[in-house]
Amino acid sequence: MGAAARALLDATGYGTSPASLLAGPTLLGAPVKVFELPERDIPMYAAEGGLHLAVTGSLTVDEASVSVPVALGLDVGPHELALFTSDPAVRTEGDLQGARVATPLPNLVRRHLATSAIAARRVIPLDPTEHAVALGIADAVAAVVDPRVEPTGALRAMRRLARVRVGHLVVVEGRTPRDDVTRLVKAQVLARLRAAGTASGTALLQYDCPTSLVEETTGLVDSTRPPEVTTLTSSWSTVRLLVERERTEGVVELLLDLGCREVITFVPRDHRTGRGDGTPGGRGAGSLPAPRALPPETGVPSGRFG
């Protein structure tokens, strides 16, 4: 799951850093600390308030002995916990009666075996597990694998017995932000993760507009998720919504015609988009045109992100 989580963070414009600190893209006004932690420890860090958000596998959350809220369930990082063996005496899952099973997710395996009325002699917490049978430590292993590809390493030579549970990447919440800037940054990080972790045919669109135009602008698209609206001032709001990727350019044109500002798309990497000028990836932040439906003095105050 570590590789899938890193790929997701890279797609949003973030990434893990050995120094545990990575300045966020210019959309954010505050730096974002990005830590790489052992996956099994993430639920505990989240439960104890050691982080604001974490990307991990849903099986890790299900395995944990603590309860943590899941902010987002994503459509990426599919994985499954499956039983394997190379022991000739174990031909089916039912042959695990009285057997030893090694796994990094012992709680899930115990529940599965109990549901299947299989009384294993012992479920051994072990990570990695793939050599446990060859070393005589266990009669079978339950390992996390990618169901889309063939198993690698020692698992390739083992027989698959059964699937225990399927999972995917999720975003869990930890500490609640105490200030407005951190709350806004957290919301933006979640928006990027949602955009990068949903179906490839969609893009996340974010823009600032007069509050009186929120209903009209959100009605331009038929989104699979409700729009997120954040109040900036008494008369301006920030809107985030999903749009079909092939419609993105046309919707951006309509938003600019209506007087929206700071129109940004994440597909899945973020880039500023202004009027079409043939520049790959859109224009830079400083080259966005002034809104044409409102005079410049009615714009959003600068520096609102810190």
Image (cartoon, helix red, strand yellow):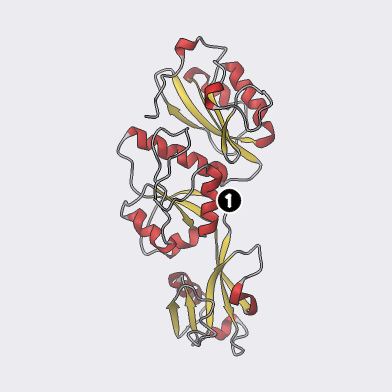
- What secondary structure is found at the residue carrying circle 1? loop
- Residue 272: x %, y % from top left: 56, 29
Residue 304 x/y as whole percent: 39, 25
- Indicate the position of residue 70 as horizontal and vertical percent values: 44, 51
Name the residue beneath numbered marker 1. Answer: 75
Comparing 146 with 117, the one in front is 146
Looking at the image, is 114 positioned above or below residue 9?
A: below
Are there few (<14), some (14-19), or many (20+) residues within 10 Å of tag 1? some
Q: Residue at x 60, y 74 (%)?
A: 153
Image height of 200 relative to 119, above or below: above
Three-letter amino acid code at the position of disc 1: Asp
| On screen, residue 54 above or below 151 | above
Image point (57%, 62%), residue name: 79
Residue nearest the observer in this picture, 160 or 51:
51
Residue nearest the viewer, comparing 84 with 261: 261
Q: Using the rendered view, name the quadrant where residue 275 is placed.
A: top right
Q: Measured from the top left, where is residue 235 in percent x and y?
A: 43, 17
- Which quadrant of the figure has residue 297? top left
**In the current view of this chain or complex, which residue is farthest to the front?**
19
Quadrant for the C terminus in the image: top left
